[in-house]
Amino acid sequence: MDSPTDLFEDSTPQIHTFAPPLCSTDVSGVHPQPSTGRPPPTFRPPGFPLIHHLLQPGGAPRRIGGQLHTHNTNLTMHRHQEDRNVDEDGGEGDGRVEQGTEGGDEGVMDGEDGLLGMKKRHSDANLASEWSQDVLRVKRMKLESRRRDGETEEGGRKREGGREGRRREREELKEQLEEARERLQALQEKVWRAFGEKHMTEEEKKRRSGNGNRGEGAVGIIEDEDIAEGMYDEEDIDGGEMEKESFSLLSASPFDNFHNHKRREEQQKDREGRMERGRGGGLHLEGVMEGVGLWLDCGGLVRGDWDGGIEEEGEEGGQKFAQALKLELGSAVARVIDRVLRLYTETADFAPSSPPAAISFLPSDTGNDGGRERGVWMGLLTRGRGEEKMGGKEEKMGGHDGEREKQLQKMSNGSSLHPDQSHRNEQSDLAMPLVVQRSPDIRKAHPLLGPPLPSHLNHSHPNLSLHHPSLSRPPPLSHPPLLPPASQSKDPSSSFHPSSSSSSSSSSSFPAPPPPPPPPPPLPLPLLHYSMQQLFSRSLHHPQLAHLPPSRKDYLNSDPFLEFPSHPSFPPLPLLGHLDPSLARHAHGGRERERGIRGDGGMRGGGGMDGGELYLTAGGISFCQQGGREMYEGLSPCHLKKAKLMFFYARYPSSNTLKTYFPDVKFNRCVTSQMIKWFSNFREFFYIQMERFARQAVREALIRDGAPRVGRESQLRVGRDTELYRILNMHYNKSNVYQVPERFIEVSDIALREFYSAIWTGRDSDPCWKKGIYKIICKLDSPVPDAFRLPGCPVG
DNA sequence: TAGATCCCTG
DNA sequence: CAGGGATCTA
């Protein structure tokens, strides 16, 4: 299963339904098994069919002659695997929007070779022709499926004459859905045109003012657009039997997008430059819509709530228009859902073993209140990037800027430095940063360090010996670890640096980290309206992912999101990963991915209702509606980032504290322990650094003065210009968008001195020598600013 | 004994 | 950062 070739071993014709994975409430027998080839029921109540019905008239999974069309991209490969998973489980398709199994005439590309091959031959020219072929195939598929639909209904009448009434109802429902689809379609087109035009205008400007060396790329884009437009128009004409929404929303093949994206990348750079109001970025939904592709652009940043969702100047009109359109879209969808729900409840006898509608199978949900569900759905459907929750709360569309400003103000205040600093400041005045101002010549007695220890002290304790094991454990350092980067010596022979980057760093207090490996080519992420993202992400969710080995799940840990203070209402959504983990892997690569955002905490298959909460899944992270609030059932990179920032204040937060400061997380045992573990890891890193630097300081003191001095530790400081601070900041505040509170520096000071003291006094020979230090540090937790009580990740 | 934490490992 | 064993504590 893990090997790519395994993905294609199963040659069984597969039916790719648009239905969600089996939910716990799904009852076998209600839905056709994929391998039977039976015509699927026209109506599929349970699970999460709603959106698929919306997206697909008739609400039925479609099989095209046993083989389904697919875009010839590596996306297909992933589909294969997922399909296998589905089949092995005997379940149904899981609502993938894309189709999976390669048609025989296309041939299946095997494993990595196939992937490489595809990459090679996907020149821009080929892209256009392939796209055209895709369009043709789509049309062909539509015709076939329509024919088959007709046949199925014919046969159905003969066989099921007695069920005429129910059939009529289904027909009616079909019509409703069709109508809804058309409405959605029209609205979507409007949005596209609005955004597309605007964007094209921008592009035009850039092209004119640019270096003019992008003609080819521009043409390529236009060509793609033309092709897509052609298809789009045809879809319009024939009523869009195919999964047009999914097709168009998810855009063309990832490779198409990849190439386009590469072209766009340059054009975006200057835009991103403007957008970059702070480092660390955010999930940047710039609304870049080009051609058929709506792209989620990770290159820039969005500050979400935390900066009030500041938009670029001059986009206000467009935003308003987009808002209006989204409202309209949302209400249209809601109306449809309402109707569908009504029909569901009215036709509940259709599937007695399955509670009607996706919402009714929750055990504790008393009553199938369509209105209520509609309300829930409204909340989900009307949440767009533009109207992201104000202040991370549940304000939906049409939020007031004033309120947002208040929130911002509050957050800004809340995240200010902790006031409790006086006692430390006094100390700080007495002791200059020991190592910061120190001369590189550490052998000279620093005036602040005073004379060397009396020689008797030098031998009074084993730890004072240079050969003491506790001092010899860390590899020798060639420079004082607490020195600011600029003053540190550069000793390439040194195998152990507190931070290797420090040697090469300049006067900047935050020197650039070691040069990262060349970033992989930016891969496009589908940019969907948030409501659509939610819908799709839910549709695309695979319960099988939960059981995949980490190597198959790692794309859930979409690391780029980690650096982006994404809006809580726009959770890190590695939709790309859902579309194709290999893409995500290529995009993010490396061990970074493995950082454990375990998205499967509480993850359920395909979403649904449980305990009165509607939940969705995005990128393996479930989130649900609870008390009018969205609650994540797993921890996202954003949560990790927030936890790290929280560490500046609380090293030992209780689980209750965590619950307080992560209001958007639905805590269960798994999530709680994960977060506790996070903090445990944070502490571990913290103490390791403290010990390391303390040992280094002791060692230096021995070298310099012959022995550490009693009281010398009081002069140890973790100034903002020290290497230790840099390392800590890099670890807990990597994007450096948050100002490290003074209090944390003080606590670090204390910890460093405690370690220093313990080491030079030889207490470190006691196996439990750190315990006392832990106890001290434990008491130094300070209140976490109120800003952290809001969902999302604070900056500032 | 369960839960928290530490410690080590990958 | 997560997993898991060891240790500690209530």
Image: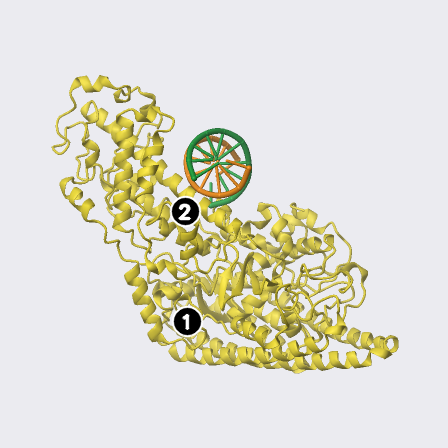
Chain colours: A yellow, B orange, C green
Q: Which residue is mark 2?
A: A516
Residue A167 left/right relative to A265: right
Residue nearest the viewer, comparing A700 with A765: A765
A584 versus A303 height, above or below: above
Q: Residues within 10 Å of mark 1 (few under 14, many from 20)?
A: some
Q: Position of residue A250 (x, y in %)?
A: 58, 67
Q: Quadrant of residue A660?
A: bottom left
Q: Position of residue A20 (x, y in %)?
A: 66, 63
Which chain contains the residue that carries disc 1? A
Q: Which residue is mark 1?
A: A207
Marks 2, 1: nearer the viewer: 2
Q: Quadrant of residue A765?
A: top left
Residue A753 left/right relative to A392: left
Write the residue at 33% across / 56% down. Answer: A737
Q: Quadrant of residue A685?
A: top left
Q: Position of residue A731 (x, y in %)?
A: 37, 46
Q: Which mark is residue A220?
A: none
Specify the amino acid type for callout 1.
Answer: Arg
Residue A403 left/right relative to A123: left
Q: Quadrant of the C terminus of chain A?
A: bottom left
Residue nearest the viewer, comparing A174 with A704: A174
Residue A514 left/right relative to A99: left
- Asked whether the viewer can see residue A457, the reply is yes
Residue nearest the viewer, comparing A232 with A393: A393
Q: Please report whichever mark, 2 or 1, sits nearer to the chain's N-terminal start.
A: 1
Specify the amino acid type for callout 2.
Answer: Pro
Which chain contains the residue that carries disc 2? A
Q: Looking at the image, which residue sits at the far right?
A: A158
